[in-house]
Image (cartoon, grey):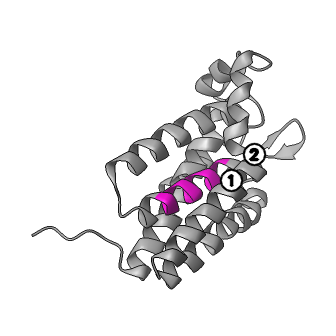
Amino acid sequence: MVMVLLGVAVRHGSTRIDDWFHRYTHTPAEYLLWLTDRYVLALIVLVTVAVANYRRQWRLALASAVCPLLALFLARILKPLFGRRLEGALAYPSGHAATVVVVMGMVVLVSGAALWAVVLAVAWCVLAIVGQGMAYHYFTDTVGAVLLGTSIVCVAALVLGHVPHRT
């Protein structure tokens, strides 16, 4: 719901925070884009699926392979509904950022929410959305994508029963 509200609020153009991030376009900070590179993400997905299969977590392995594709699909379906454009291309929500969030979320689930995985995932996602927010998207597109991606990971965790229980 928050993703939809944000999309409606920003669909007509740039915001002040978007303008601030775009001041850093064409700077060395764009090297952060490698964090959203499809080959890098594909390698992480392959390793995540392999670890889940090794642990005989078949449903989690399947979710680790399918959920990133679902993020891309949903971002592409949602973009025309919001109609926000950047340099002629539909921008909200960012499919790049949503996919990164889902891939790293699956890493966290496969690791059993180990502290190292949570720290790695948060750092990777923050740096990736900063890179996308400076280069190919408005920063607010990446915020919408984080909301979309986390919802996919949370639904996957609930469906798979990977929700930690407090005692």
- Measured in 3D between alpha carbons, the distance from the residue under mark 1 to the one under mark 2, in whole angstroms, is 6 Å
Element under disc 1: helix
In this view, the residue in front, 48 or 98, is 48
Q: Circles 1 and 2: CB distance less than 8 Å?
A: yes
Residue drawn at 71 percent across, 49 percent down? 40
Q: Relative to residue 35, is residue 135 drawn left or right?
A: right
Element under disc 2: loop
Residue 76 in the image: state x and y as whole percent: 76, 62
Residue drawn at 48 percent across, 37 percent down? 123
Which residue type carries mark 1? Leu
Which residue type carries mark 2? Asp
Residue drawn at 46 percent across, 43 percent down? 120
> With respect to residue 92, does 63 lie above or below?
below
User: Does 63 appear in magenta?
Assistant: no
Residue 161 in the image: state x and y as whole percent: 36, 80
Q: Does residue 138 show up?
A: no
Q: What residue is disc 1 on?
A: 41
Task: Write the start and end of the magenta stretch as one range.
Answer: 97-107
Q: What residue is disc 2 on?
A: 37
Q: Does residue 31 show up?
A: yes
